[in-house]
Every structure is written in C-alpha cells, then in structure tokens.
Image: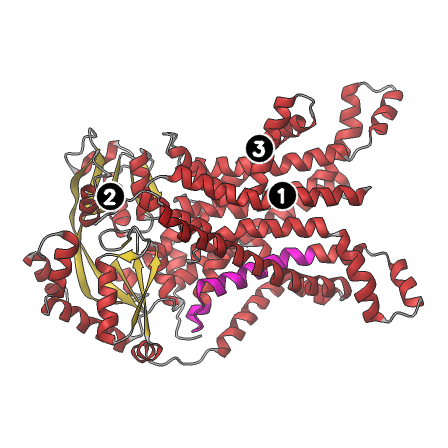
Amino acid sequence: MNLFTPLSWSDSGFILTGILNTVYISVVAIIVGSLLGLLVGFVRAESNKSINMLLGAFLDVLRSVPLIIQLILFTTFIGAMGYPLNPFAAGSIILSLYTMAFMSEVFRSGFDSVPTSTIKAARSLGLNYLQTVRYIRIPIGMRAVFPSWLGVALSVIKDSALVSVIGYMELLRTAEQLISRTQQPIMILIGVGLFYFMISYPLSRYGKYVERKMEI
Amino acid sequence: MKLIKKISLVVASIAAIGAFSNASADKLDDVIKRGTLNCGVVLDFPPMGYTDKDNKPAGFDVDYCNDLAAVLGVKSEVINLTWGDRIPSLISAKTDVVVGSTSDTLARAKSVGFTYPYFVFKFQVLSKKGVRMASFDDLKDVKVGAALGTTYETEYFKYADSKGWGRDNYTSFKSENDAFLGLYQGKIDALISTNTNIATKLTSGQFDGFVAGPYVPNYDDVVGLIAKRDELAWIKYLNLFLVHQIRDGRLNELHMKHFGTAVSPDMVQSLRDNK
Amino acid sequence: MNNYEFHWNVVFDAFPQLLSGAFTTVHVSVLSMLVGIVIAVLLALGKLSNNKVFYHFANIWIEIARNTPALFLIYMAYFGLGAYGIHLSPYLAVFSALVFINAGYLAETFRGGFQSIPTTQYSAAKSLGMNNIKVYRYVILPQMFRRIYHPMTNQFVWSILMSSLGILVGMNELSGETQRLQSTSFRTLEFFMVAAAMYFVITKLVLFTSSLIAKKVFKGELS
C-alpha cells in the first residue's frame, strides 16, 4: 500500500475538477442570488413597513448566522425531514440565499437611488408603471450599484470555499485531500491562493475603475 | 416584539417544512430499488479508509462497503466523511450506512443505531523520537493532540481530568490527517490515534522519526457500523452481513490484505462477545 | 417531523461549554478587530504616502487580504507556516488570519474616508487660525469617523461570523465546541440550531450597541 505519494501530473485532472466545481457553484449562486436579490430588493423598495419587516427579519437571519453553520444546519435539517440533497444542490441553495440577502440590499439602494422626479417625469411622458420599472428604474438604478454588485459577487466566489464542509469537492477540499496524501501543504496552498487571486483581483480592479468613472 | 415575530417566523417555517414530509419506505427496500448503496467512510483513517494515488477511495472499510453492496446486488457509492460528518450524513440521508469505525458509546446510541461490532481497536500514542514516552502519564509534559470529537479525545480528556492535568498542552484537529500533519510538522510532540492507523503510518516510511508508544490504559475501542436508529430491519440485515463476514472468512482475508496478518483469535472472540 | 425526535436536555447540560465557546468567539473577534484597526491605519497611511516601499507593501497586503478566501488564509497561517516550523496555536492562526483580513479591508475604508474630505476644508480651518493638531481633532477626524463608522461595524460583524472557521483548525470557539459536542452525543441538529441562535444574538447585540453609540456620538447624523 502506498499511503503517501507526491504530487504528479496525473493529479491535474483532479485539480481541474475542483476548480470547475468552484466556478460552477459560484456562478449558480451569483446568478440565482442576483435574480432573487433583484426581486426582493424591488419588493422592499416598494412595499409597506410590515412586509418590509417580515422580509427584513428573514434576511437578517441569513446575514447574522455564519455560512458554515447555515450549510451544516440546512443539509442536516432537510435530510432529517426526509429530503436528502446532494452537496451541490444543498450548497447552491444556501449559497444562493446567502447571496440574495446581500444582493437585495445592493439592489434596494439602487432602486432608492433613482430620484422620484425622474420617475414622475417618465410617468408624465405616458409610460405605465411596469414600463417605468423596465426602462427607467432598473437601467438607472442598476448602473449605479454595479460596483457594489461586483463586490458581493466576488465575496461569493471566496465564500464558496466553505461549501467544502458539507462534502462538495470544490478547489479547497480537493487541495486538502492532496495535502493529506502528499504532506506538502505549501505548494498546494499557494496554488489555491493564486487561483482565487487571479479571478478576484482583475475583477475588483475593474470594479474600482467603473466606480471612479462614475464619480467623474 | 421584533424578536417574538422573528421566532414565530422561524417556527412557522419549520412547521411548514414538517407538514410536507411523508413516511419513507423501508431502507432495505430503498437501497435495492435505488440500485446504489451510499456508504459513508472516513477516508483519512488508513488502513480503514484512505485515498490511493489515483485519488480513489481504498481501505478495509471501503472493501466492507463493496462487499455489502455486492451481497445486496447494488452499486457501491463510497462517500468521503470526516469524523464529525458521520452523523449529519446519516440524518441528512446522504448515506445509508457509515462504515466508519464508530465507537459504540451509550450516549451515541441514543441518537443513532449501532450494529454488532465489526472491529476492535486499541488507542495508542505516537510520539517524536527522543520524547520520553515510557507510560501514558508522560503525556502530561508534552504537547499532545488528537482529532476533534473522537472517542480517543474523550478518553484522553477523561484521563487527563482525573489526574488534574489541565488542557493547556492539548490541541485538537479537524481530522485524523490534520493531526498527523500537525505531528509531522512539529505542532505537537505526540498524538493519540488507533493502533492500526499508527502501525500503517509507521510502515509508510514517512513517519520514520516517530515511535509508537503506550496504549490508553484499560480501554478497548469496540466499533460498529451505524445507520438511522429507527431502521430496524436494515440494521438486522447489516448485523447478519457482519456475521457472514466472519463466518465466510472475509474478515480474515481483508485483515490479511490491509494489515498483513491474520485476524487475531482475540479480536474474533471480542467481536462475538460484544454482539 | 419525519421521525426526528429532538433531545434538548443534552444541549442544556452542555450549555456551559457552549457559552465558553461563545466567549472565545467574541474574544477573538474583538481582539482581531482592535489589532486590525491599528494596522489598517498604518496601511492606509502607506497607501497615501509617496514612499514607494511603503506604498507597495500596503498595496500587496490589502490586495491579498481582499482577494483570497478567509479559509485559505487560516489554512495558510496554520499548516502553511507550520511547514516552515512556525507553529501558531489554532487560536493564533485564526486570530492572525482575521487581523490580516480586517486590516486589509479597513485600510481601504480608512483611505476612502480620509480622501472623502475635501482639502479645501483643511485650508479653511488653517485660515481660521487652527494648528495642525486642532484641524485634525476638530475638523477632519470627526467627519472621517462618521463616514467609516458603519463600515467598521460591518467588518466587526463579519469577524464574528468568520471566526466560525475556527472549526476547521480545531479551535475551541463556538463552532468548534459545537462540533465536538455533537460528535460525542451525535445530536447534530440540536447543537447547531443553538449555535446559530447564539451567533444571531451576538451579532444583534453588537449591532444594537453600535447604533446606541452612534446615536450618542453622532446625534443621529450618521451618513
């Protein structure tokens, strides 16, 4: 039996799967989380106090409990109820909801940033309610919050590493398994760090660039 | 008021999910119908479970999973768990059974169903060469560690507390592998694990600078398979499977394969005694 | 409920351990925040300085902290440094990773806050006869503090939540303690539900206190 074997080229496929799994779950969470966040943000910007409080309470829980605990609780709970989910499905659901909680705030402030005078002007030009939302509030409001949106999206990519705790073989868990086998943490860890950095850094630079441009 | 609203919201949503749930069929039927056995193994516990150089699961426990799947006539799907994942994986029905060297404590048996024992371990100390480790009491003066939530951690705490050692020299690790990596790197001078794991690590050549030391006094670690507590028919089937593994000589074969020696009569006797 | 019976008495018996875990959680987040703030001020000054070495040092720190996962940095502090014979305890590993990240994020917050105050205010205050110290004490810093207060509170909450990653290096904070307790009793749902509630209460208390302080200090003029 060969317990400890060094890293070799045959591991590259294994690492690539880990990378793809990280990308996969992040993209799902960002897309689903953004769509839900847009909806919730809009509802919160529009609705009265009591609905807002109810929604706010739910979002509050998502934002006040560590993601790692949410993941463990959700998989255990849903399984105990008799609806077992695989790690990808369970991870996507929680990560999407978590993303939604932050995105809804971003979008809400976007909707709030559109001046009422602009909306009134649009209505007086003959646009109906839905048209104002579609042509005025979403385009103008969303442009204003693009940098914040990107910020949340980037943190989702980084937080996706936590889905490893419920058994999803994403990049960090892949790396961990390789470390156990090779007993060489440094090289593998630095590789993992570089990967996240290479995705996150250019995008965050782009976000800052857009932000600066909007200020001018 | 706000808090009460929040609490009632949570309670309401829990009740809503609860209302949807329906009675599930018998686990044994489920597995056979599904055509796959979801079998949980702790893959950082060689030679019971580990990953080979192709990153595929291997080990004694993995072979037990495959044997079980074979007699059921289904595909074997090995699911990698950490010590802490074992119960959540059962409750969340991610696994049908965990072949994961689970010590059959009475506290745990309140939560989960145990089969007959399938293996007996000794808890042992592995320490750096040059560290004085003549008896278990020498652990008092060195940095010692073990994997979090394991029975040997509990046993060590019990022993340390009875001697009034305190816990300042103790470090826990998330997993077995992390504990060995910690020892290897020098974070700790000694760790506590099972005799089998330590023997395997020592034969690997990677741990030449370390020696196996004393056993945890007066303790036999008797381990069983675990399944959901209420799946009685399923547990009965698993029991019969374990009896057959001994009777048909498969236990001995696998012991030869993974430990290089025949299974000791003592262990077989202990497995029978503990039934 | 689909045949899951809750056993709460196990959790009640273990409540002292959970509380001590929660205390460690608060402990590590408060300390990492305080040290993080001090370093963040230095980093922000570095980014504003003309000295190339300071600037690049601050820049690299900030970008690494902001663009890599917290979990990665904790592993790095624990097993990464361990490979070089530097052995941090689980507590110190989590603490230093949190400090590293807090400093990186707060540095940008501070820099933004500083730059948001127009230089004309500085000249105006000077022309009123204030010396440098007075200008900062009465004009610049109060405004700056108001702008960075909210992001700082958020960063603190983030620290509390992220300290839960201590579970992955065997630290005895709330999550790690929960993990140990559920491993010995196998009552996963109960223990993690209580842990979640405790985190919720802790963060709510922090936010509540923060808004109380804000009301007192800023008299409701928080931007």
Residue A87 place in picture, x, y as percent? 45, 62
Which residue is drawn at the image coordinates 38% and 39% (left, top)?
A185
Which residue is drawn at the image coordinates 80% and 29% (left, top)?
C139
Chain containing the residue with disc 2: B
Question: Does mark 3 fall on the same chain as mark 2?
Answer: no
Question: Does mark 1 fall on the same chain as mark 3?
Answer: no
Q: Is label 1 or label 2 in front?
A: 1
Chain containing the residue with disc 1: A
- Frontmost residue, C13 versus A159: A159
What span is colored magenta in the figure?
A: A78-105
Label 2 environment density (alpha carbons within 10 Å; few <14, some 14–19, many ≥20)? many
Query: Where is the C terminus of chain C found, in terms of image quarters?
Result: top right
Q: Is residue A78 left or right of residue B44?
A: right
Return the residue at label 3: C61
Chain containing the residue with disc 3: C
Alpha carbon distance from label 1 to label 2: 46 Å
Label 1 environment density (alpha carbons within 10 Å; few <14, some 14–19, many ≥20)? few
Alpha carbon distance from label 3 to label 1: 16 Å
Q: Amino acid at mark 1?
A: Pro
- Frontmost residue, A102 versus B155: A102
Q: Is residue A27 magenta?
A: no
Task: Determine the main secondary structure of the stretch shown in magenta.
Answer: helix
Return the residue at label 1: A202
